[in-house]
Image: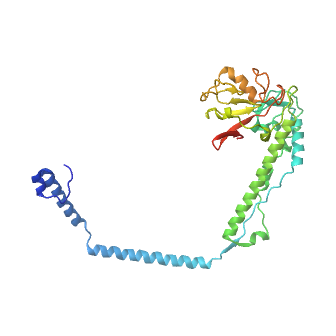
Amino acid sequence: MRKIAAHRSLSAVIDGRISLHEYLGNHLADVAAGIAAESAQISDMQADWLCSRWNIAFTIAKRISFIELWHRNQISKMVPAPMLNELPARHDPSQSAGMNEDSFKGTGHVVRKAGTGFRCIKCFVFKPFRHHTDWFLLPCSACPRDGPDDLMADTMVCGAECVAGGSEELGGEGGQTLVSRATRSEMTRSNRREARNILCANRRLAESSVLRSVIQHTTDPVAEVFHENLDSLPPVPLWVQMISHTHRLAWTGGVISCKYCGGTCTGGRARLLASTCRHNIAEGSKAQLDRLTMGRLPLHLPDWADARTDPTSIRNVFPFSFGDGARKFGV
């Protein structure tokens, strides 16, 4: 049975627009709905009782709000100043560099650049660049040591002592100063923000000095590092812009390589870089990709593509990034 409009009369049945079964069914449904509405309707007495209870509840809530407002007015708006943590001391860059250099000499490592990190040529331990601080904590296993005190790990500059010192609270007469609640919150946030900035600055200083100490003691008897920066690079060639965006490209001395498929190109036709990236490095491409990652010239190339240095020099690796719809140097 389908629903029909309530205003349909018996003439619609005679005209054949609706059936008699549908007309009677919908008419009986309307009658039953009316009876149900009349039986569910609350009486006037019940409505008056409900309204009176609502009025009582509103009166109670209003009185409670007046009592709370009175109590708030009795409380002072000024609160004691917060107990601020002692700020850590900033590290001296020159002192940090000297301590790290002495610490690295005490470990006995002789490291050289290898791919994305450094490798000791004595004990063959490899540490990535982001784990360069581990060189100060791990002595060289190829060099016998007299005792654990020889390792000057305690001279390594870090923010641990600053964190421990920042947990002590300052007391005395300064803690009884009355300030507003907003000022108290702002003083606490400013203190934490300044302490966090100092710790981050000390950590960055320690990491840079540690990495600089490791690089200074990196030995490479054959190759020399050719230092270059983004300003010294030539404009990105047009043929590099034509390579599919599915490749993750990097520039090493004019040689373009993809870290996902191992494809390389120096300006001519490149089979792997001519199509979308396969995200699978073939066995024949792994060796040359490893050499490019370490900044060395692949064995199948006679010279660097930009001809700025000799083939034995180590070049910097500059990844490409997308900006304004085009590739550019930098992460």
Residue 123 drawn at (x, y percent): 82, 27
Q: Nearer the viewer, residue 296 or 67?
A: 296
How many marks do you count on the picture? 0
* Point 79% across, 52% down: residue: 162
Question: In the displayed image of the protein, which residue is found farthest to the left?
Answer: 14
Q: Is residue 234 left or right of residue 71?
A: right
Residue 147 drawn at (x, y percent): 88, 34
* Point 13% across, 55% down: residue: 12
Quarter occupied by residue 83 = bottom right
Q: Is residue 312 left or right of residue 1?
A: right
Quarter occupied by residue 189 = bottom right
Q: Nearer the viewer, residue 306 or 98?
A: 306
Question: In the displayed image of the protein, which residue is found farthest to the front?
Answer: 238
Q: Nearer the viewer, residue 213 or 56?
A: 213
* Point 78% across, 66% down: residue: 171
* Point 84% across, 51% down: residue: 91
Q: Is residue 71 left or right of residue 10?
A: right
Image quadrant occupied by the C terminus: top right
Q: How is the image coloured?
A: rainbow
Q: Is residue 87 left or right of residue 95?
A: left
Residue 107 drawn at (x, y percent): 86, 35
Q: Is residue 191 visible?
A: yes
Q: Nearer the viewer, residue 302 or 3?
A: 302
Vertical comparison of 115 with 213: above or below: above
Q: Is residue 158 visible?
A: no
Residue 30 drawn at (x, y percent): 19, 59
